[in-house]
Amino acid sequence: MTSQHLSLASILERWIAGESIDQSDREQLVAWETTDRAAAFEIAPENVEAAVEHRLEVLAGLRGQFDRFPIPVNGSCLVTLWTLWLPLAISIAQIRQTLDRPLVQGVLGGQGMGKTTLAAMLKIILAQLGYSMVGISIDDLYKTYADRQRLRERDPRFIRRGPPGTHDVDLGVQTLDCLCRVPSSAGIEVPRFDKSLWNGEGDRIAPETIEGADIILFEGWFVGVRCIDPVVFDNPPHPIATAADIAFAREMNQKLAEYLPLWERLDRLLVLHPRDYRLSQKWRLQAEHQAISSGKAGMSDDEIREFVEYFWKSLHPELYIDPLTRNPEFVDLVVSVEADRTISRVYRPI
C-alpha cells in the first residue's frame, strides 16, 4: 500500500476499534475525497464533510458484521471498503430512492476482477443502509447442458460455455422484468447454475425463490458489451490469428446484438478494468495453482492459457472493454485495477 493508504488504514482501524478520531484525521479524510472519486460519487466541496461523516457512521454500523465479509478485514480491505465499496453502496442506495421500482446495477468484469467480492460486500452494506439486494450472474443464464451439447454438435467451435450464444437471453429478460415489476411480497424464481456438474461443463439447478429485492446486481464478463465495427477484424489483436479465429470473432460480434434486450434493462453499468487485460490470465493461473495446492483438481498452465484465450478470441478486451471505459453513454463508473489488485482510480467516462 502507498503511504497515503497506510495512513487511511490506520485511521479506519482506530475507528472500527471504537476509538474516536480527532479533527486532524477528519480533515485528512476530507482531503482524500478531492480526487477523481469525488466526481464519480457526486462529492463536492459543499457536501464532502457530510459525505465523510455519513460513511463513518455506516462503517461503525458494520463493526459487528466483519465475520460476514468475504475477505479478511485488514488494512487493504479497509482501504477498498472506504474508497470503493462504501461510497458505491451509498450512491446506489441514493439512486434507488429516486425510483419507484428496483434498481438494476450492471457490473462488467473479467476473470479475477473481484466481481464476487464486490457483490458480497454491496449486499452487506446495502442491508446496513436498509436495502435488500439479489445478485444474478450472466453465468446463471447459461443454456442447459443438453442444449449446449446440441449447440456444440451443430457448431464445434463452441467447445465450452461462455461466449455469446451459450446463454438464454429470454430467460434473463424475463427474470429482470419479473424482479422489477412483481410486488416484493410475491415469490420470484431466480435462475441458478452449478459449474461443477457434468465434469465442469455445468448445468442449471433448481431456481432460487426470493421475495423480491430493492437492488438487482447483474454481473458478468461481458455484461453491457455491444457490437463493434467489423472492420477491426481486418487486423485483429492476438490471439485472433487464423482465418478461423477471425470468422469466429466476427460471428460472436454479430451475436452480441441478441443481448441488447438484456443490456437495455440496466439502469447503471460499472466496469472493473484491469491495467492490462492479460492480467486476467495471470490471476486465473494463480487461482488454479492455489486450488491444486489445497488438494483440488485443476487445469495445467497450458490448459489455463488456452481457456482464457478462447474468451479473448470471442470478445477481445482491447476491442470491446477498453472503448467502453471511455463511453459515457453506456458506462457510469470505471474502476481501474492494478496488477496487485489494488484500485488506482474510480472515475466517470467523459
Image (cartoon, rainbow, N blue to C red):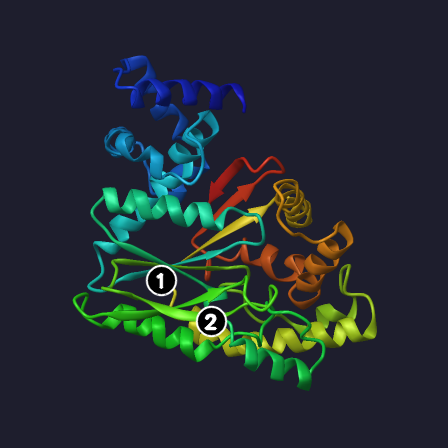
Task: Name the residue at 54% across, 35% down.
Answer: 342
Residue 170 percent location from the top left of the image: 43, 80
Compared to 252, does 109 lie above or below? above
Residue 96 percent location from the top left of the image: 25, 55
Query: Counting residues from the N terminus, which is met first, the one under dot 2 or under dot 1?
Result: 2
Label 2 secondary element? strand
Residue 32 percent location from the top left of the image: 41, 26
Task: Name the residue at 77% across, 71% down.
Answer: 245
Task: Name the residue at 68% across, 61% down.
Answer: 312
Which residue is at the far bottom? 154
140 left or right of 302 in image: left
Is disc 1 surrounded by few (<14), some (14 to 19) or many (20+) residues within 10 Å?
Answer: some
Which residue occupies the foreground of this view, 220 or 260? 220
Q: Which quadrant of the view contains residue 9?
A: top left
268 left or right of 247 in image: left
294 left or right of 155 in image: left
Please report contact status of discs 2 and 1: CB closer than 8 Å, yes or no. Answer: no
**Amino acid at pointer 2:** Arg
Task: Name the residue at 40% across, 50% down.
Answer: 119
**Amino acid at pointer 1:** Asp
Q: Which residue is mark 2?
A: 204
Compared to 62, does 235 lie above or below? below
- Nearer to us: label 2 or label 1: 2
Which residue occupies the foreground of this view, 231 or 287? 287
123 left or right of 143 in image: left
Q: Which residue is mark 1?
A: 267
Q: Which quadrant of the view contains residue 58?
A: top left
Residue 278 percent location from the top left of the image: 69, 49
Label 1 secondary element? loop
